[in-house]
Amino acid sequence: MPDKLNLKLSVLPQTFAICRLEKNTPVPEWALRGSQFSSITASSEEISIVCDETVVPPDVKAVKGWRAFMVEGQLDLAMTGVIASLTAPLAEAGISVFTLSTFATDYLLVKAERLDDAVDVLSAFCQINA
């Protein structure tokens, strides 16, 4: 397990869904509703959307029931090892994660039923505002 890190994490209050749309699908308006956080990622294979699970239409391919940790504060893009330092102990505990990064910070999503376990693991070396 890593030494105490100078990272603060917040647990976002919403429950999220990770959705998959076919490539070249226009971004639907619902993807940006209902939450302080959403993410849209397009590749040559697909469009992935992370958003508040309550806004996802029933006909969209989605895995619901994810909770998110946000690394507080602005991270320098030159920083290394932030995601690795957070995901390694979670992997050791058998907790799978879905990670996202923005220009400013990083997010880790864990299944809602493992949130308490993830908080226990991460609070050993990070401050967590739940």
Image: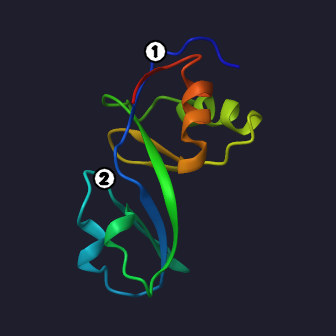
Which quadrant of the figure has residue 93? top right
State the residue lying farthest toward the top. Answer: 4
Q: What residue type is labelled 2?
A: Phe
Residue nearest the viewer, comparing 36 with 119: 119
Q: What kind of element bears circle 2?
A: loop
Q: Nearer the viewer, mark 2 or mark 1?
A: 2
Residue 117 against residue 63 in the figure, above or below: above
Mark found first going from the N terminus, 2 or 1: 1
Using the rendered image of the protein, determine whether residue 98 is visible from the camera's viewpoint: no
Question: Could you say where residue 39 lies in the image, as x and y percent from the top left?
Answer: 37, 60
Give me the disc on residue 6: 1
Residue 88 against residue 6 in the figure, above or below: below
Residue nearest the viewer, comparing 112 with 40: 112
Q: Which amino acid does label 1 sit on?
A: Asn
Give me the disc on residue 37: 2
**Residue drawn at point x = 31 percent, y = 31 percent:** 74
Give me the disc on residue 15: none
Question: Could you say where residue 30 lies in the image, as x and y percent from the top left?
Answer: 27, 75
Which quadrant of the figure has residue 40? bottom left
